[in-house]
Image (tube, rainbow, N blue to C red):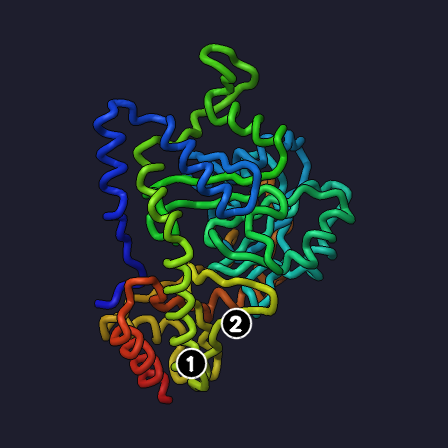
Amino acid sequence: MIPITVVDVRDAEDLVVEVLRSGAIAQGPMVKRFEDAFAAVSGTKHAIAVNNGTTALVASLQVLDLKPGDEVVTSPFTFVATLNAILEAGATVRFADIRRDDFAIDPDAVAKVVTDRTKVLMPVHLYGQTADMGKLTPLAAEHGLKVIEDSAQAVGASFEGKQAGSFGIGCFSLYATKNITTAEGGVITTDDDALADKLRVLRNQGMRARYQYEVAGHNYRMTDLHAAVGIPQLAKLDQLTAARQANAKRLSEGLAGTPGLDIPQVLPGREHVWHQYTVLVGPHAFLSRDELAAALTERGIGNGIYYPKIVFDYDCYRGHDLIPGARVEDFPVAKAVSEQALSLPVHPHLTESDLDTIIETVREVLGA
């Protein structure tokens, strides 16, 4: 089987052993070391490590002191953590449709749904490429909106030389399958000193110092063990990203012209880090998306459907008070993409033979 992803953190063994031998395994100097390295990668003054990517989103919303009825505009085509975080923060969710070329929220659609109650714009940088921050950032400024970037899949990505997570408040996931992993973990990035301070107090049960409580806080901390897993990966992020980019280039060259298959684009001014290599299986393809996925699995090629439905199209969200008026049919691009998107292996551990096999198999089963 050629897997959809491979997790290899063996480079972290020495640092993990160092933490274990120290006897201090909770948040400590290794977390600070990880934060400093991550801030350098993201091009921001501050990186605040937390226990997962969802927490990063929740905490970022919490420190903005949103009130009941305040709205957050985001993408309907994303992992459910994006939606869950907004609901947990008690905000009202508004969705704007996506663009087919970058799978991210459409600035023109955002402009149509912003109201005087909208306080936050939360673009999702999907699959390793940023949203169109060249249009979204001035749009947010025009309406006085805070920008929280769901950068879970975009560590190292950039728009016109500016790193994902540096346009507002950046929220990253370090889950096991991400380009940089700590098994579980997350990071919040910002250039705002006051905001960074609030986040650090919030994540530590609201304590500035031991038993010096300033807010009603939470335990959002990352452990030194988790940080130790991530530090060596940050040191070789450029190398890992280059391997993903080379693999994506090879896949795109090999799959170009396959009937019914749209290959992913790298849009001008954007650095794509290829968390996923996601094709679209169109309505005129020889097989449907689900049939292609099954055929590839049968032939030993891992693949993934990210995501099979619009994010709120589940019973648990229907009729939710904080998701007013959301209807699947109002988001035709997101709906079509959710029915056509299929991710193929692009991780750094693929061999030339693996890439050849993926390309030949996809073309064969699609009748190319």
Q: Is residue 256 left or right of residue 95?
A: left
Q: Amino acid at mark 1?
A: Glu
Q: Quadrant of residue 256?
A: bottom left
Of callouts 2 and 1, which one flags the residue occurring earlier in the amino acid sequence? Answer: 1
Rendered location of residue 74, percent (x, y): 60, 50
Q: Secondary structure at mark 1?
A: helix
Rendered location of residue 134, percent (x, y): 68, 58
Residue 253's disc is 1
Q: How many marks?
A: 2
* Residue 308 visible (yes or no): no
Residue 315, placed above or below residue 100: above
Query: Viewer-proximal residue, 88 or 119?
Result: 119
Query: Viewer-proximal residue, 328 or 6?
Result: 6
Q: Are marks 2 and 1 in contact (CB under 8 Å)?
A: no
* Residue 44 visible (yes or no): yes
Residue 197, placed above or below residue 343: above
Residue 265's disc is 2
Q: Quadrant of the C terminus?
A: bottom left
Packing grade of label 1 (10 A; few <14, some 14-19, many >=20) is few
Query: Viewer-proximal residue, 152 or 266?
Result: 266
Which residue is at 55% across, 44% downward? Answer: 170
Rendered location of residue 360, percent (x, y): 30, 82
In three-dimensional space, the C-alpha distance between marks 2 and 1, rounded to whole angstroms, equals 12 Å
Q: Secondary structure at mark 2?
A: loop
Residue 247, placed above or below residue 157: below
Which residue is at 34% across, 66% downward? Answer: 345
Q: Amino acid at mark 2?
A: Gln
